[in-house]
Amino acid sequence: MIAVLSGLILRAVVVLTGTAVATFALLWHAPGDPALAIALARFGSQVPAEVVDEIRREAGLETGFWPAFQAWISPLLRGDFGQSSVTGRDVWPDLVTAMSYSFPLAILGLLVGLVISVPLAVIATRRPGGLLDRLAVALASMGTAIPQFWLALLLILLFAVHLGWLPAMGARTPTHAILPALALGLGVAASFTRILRSGILEARSQPFLPAIRRRGVAARRVERDHVAPHAAVPVITVFGLELAFLLEGIVVIEVIFARPGLGSFLVNAIFARDFPKVQAVVIVTAVIFVIINLVIDLLYRALDPRIGERNA
């Protein structure tokens, strides 16, 4: 077990290192003058050239790529995300405030997806090929094909503009989270329904199940002890990936619904070329993604020990 954990942690370190280097390189080589972008975001439209030069020296943009990267990564390894290039405030408190809006919304979207997909998949697999099964597959395929941003706009148009039932922008009350959660959750439900349906059908077709039933084992026990664990492996994969991708998709959703979360935090930082803020968002989401994948790998081995044997 120690060898397995060591290998997983080593892979996580490699992924995080590559993510840090790639993010810094993309920002460093982006078109335009980053010092000018920071100056415009800080002072407005009229910025003297000497002020731009001062900001360039202040941000370490004159030292070259690798010295600047080292100057950023060294404090980060000690848990210091640095100060904003625009406001001068510490990045971490502002990032925590943004995450306090985004993480609950991501969890709520995931719950919406589970509440819709699990009953739909179970009902669909009762009679494979029947009317309900075909309807569930059609709805899941439509949900997968519809872009998330377009679905969000449709929800705003229907429930906020035409019906006037729900607010479309802001995050002042719990009702402001309903439409963004639906926009996130419906996409999750589409993926979960397809994967869960396929997993259940595959688990029920296993050749050893008829022998178990002939022994007189109750159908509920067969579903619980044999079908459910077999069907859970692909579902766990999708569950973990969807939770990670929700944190990425939430950026677009929060911008559309004008929510003060990671979306507006990241977009404003990108436009202002605020390197510390952009890098902080990318690193935090990468850490979350790596942790989720680590937990998934451990759950695999708990559900199916043969996975650990094949990787040994």
Image (cartoon, rainbow, N blue to C red):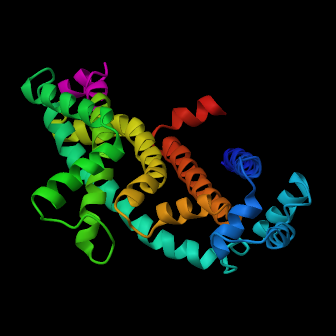
Magenta segment includes 202: yes
Please state if 25 lies on the left or on the right of 250 as rendered.
right
- Image location of residue 112, percent across then percent down: 26, 54
- Image location of residue 158, percent across then percent down: 15, 52
Principal SS element in the magenta part?
helix
Please state if 190 lies on the left or on the right of 266 as rendered.
left
Seen in the picture, residue 191 relative to 273 is either above or below; the reply is above
Part of the protein shown in magenta:
200-214
Residue 113 in view in this figure: no
Q: Residue visible at 40% across and 46% down? A: 239
Q: Residue visible at 25% across and 59% down? A: 179
Q: Residue visible at 67% across and 49% down? A: 5
Q: Quadrant of residue 162?
A: bottom left
Q: In which quarter of the image is residue 74?
A: bottom right
- Image location of residue 217, percent across then percent down: 19, 34
Q: Residue visible at 90% across and 54% down? A: 64
Looking at this view, is 16 or 89 the one in front? 89
- Image location of residue 116, percent across then percent down: 21, 48
